[in-house]
Amino acid sequence: MALALVTGASRGIGRATAILLAQEGYTVAVNYHQNAQAADEVVSLIKASGGKAFAVQADVGDEAQVEAMFAVLDEQPEALTALVNNAGILFTQSRVEALSAERINRVLKTNVTGYFLCCREAVKRMGQGGAIVNVSSAASRLGAPFEYVDYAASKGAVDTLTMGLALEVAAQGIRVNGVRPGLIYTEMHASGGEPGRVDRVKSMLPMQRGGQPEEVAQAIVWLLSEKASYVTGSFLELAGGK
């Protein structure tokens, strides 16, 4: 089988996706930024189930670190055929009038520049074809007013990257799609200052519940698979109907 890179794979949606890809037969590169212990736990879980995985550290917003990460992938016996751009950050809930340039730029560096850099390096290596899934957010459609407009704007950029790159590389046999999760039970809400956010607002969703990381992972793995062989430049909405 081939090699898959999942960025931000030490927790949440990335973790669930890495585990599921390994079950599908991929060798999984588990990228992490700081939490080596969490990444190693994902690798151990995959190996305990008979899968193949290894951890690779990189801040995806740093060009040199991204290039070093892909150099590690080049040393693997399998060719890279799948990329899941998932690493993302957000900060404490805030109105736009209180945002600093530093915060905005930190969000954009990881959530936008990081996706661009990983797409760039992956496309260079997908000469025999491949698939990329960019993890966006329902916030790109909704704007996340009073909370995370900077994060929402970064995901709007991810959507545009997904559409533009899909058109650029379609003739090369590379498919590029996106998923837009909504309120999912992940640690990211704690980063935003409200660990219990999903439970607070889930009654406002048509489905009356938050989503699980595994539900998003299933959609990502489908988009990477041959079952989605005629799908590119498309988005799956994973937001409980919102």
Image: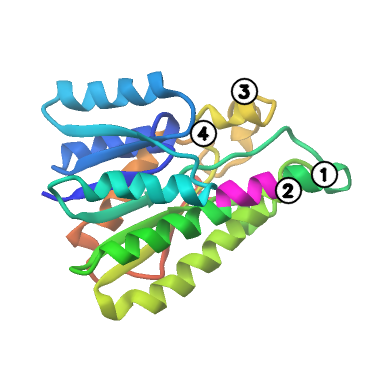
Q: Earlier in the sequence, mark 1 or mark 4?
A: 1
Q: Earlier in the sequence, mark 4 or mark 3?
A: 3
Which sits earlier in the primary sequence, circle 2 or circle 4?
2
Residue segment shown in magenta: 104-111
Q: Which residue is mark 3?
A: 195
Q: Nearer the viewer, residue 72 or 129?
A: 72
Q: Is residue 23 above or below residue 109?
A: above
Q: Is residue 133 left or right of residue 98?
A: left
The secondary element bearing badge 4 is classed as: loop
Nearer the observer, disc 1 or disc 3?
A: 1
Q: Which mark is residue 99?
A: 1
Determine which quarter of the picture holds residue 121.
bottom left
Q: Is residue 35 magenta?
A: no
Pair 2/4: label in front: 2
Q: CA distance from mark 1 to mark 4?
A: 30 Å
Per the model, the C-alpha gap separating discs 1 and 3 is 21 Å
Q: Residues within 10 Å of mark 1 (few under 14, many from 20)?
A: some
Residue type, mark 1 in image = Leu
Asked if the residue under mark 1 is in contact with the one under mark 2, i.e. CB atoms within 8 Å, the reply is: yes
Q: Tell me if 218 is positioned left or right of 48 in this view.
A: right
Depth check, front residue: 218 or 7: 7
Circles 4, 3 touching at the beta carbon (< 8 Å): no
Identify residue for label 2: 104
Q: CA distance from mark 2 to mark 4?
A: 30 Å
State the residue position of label 4.
209
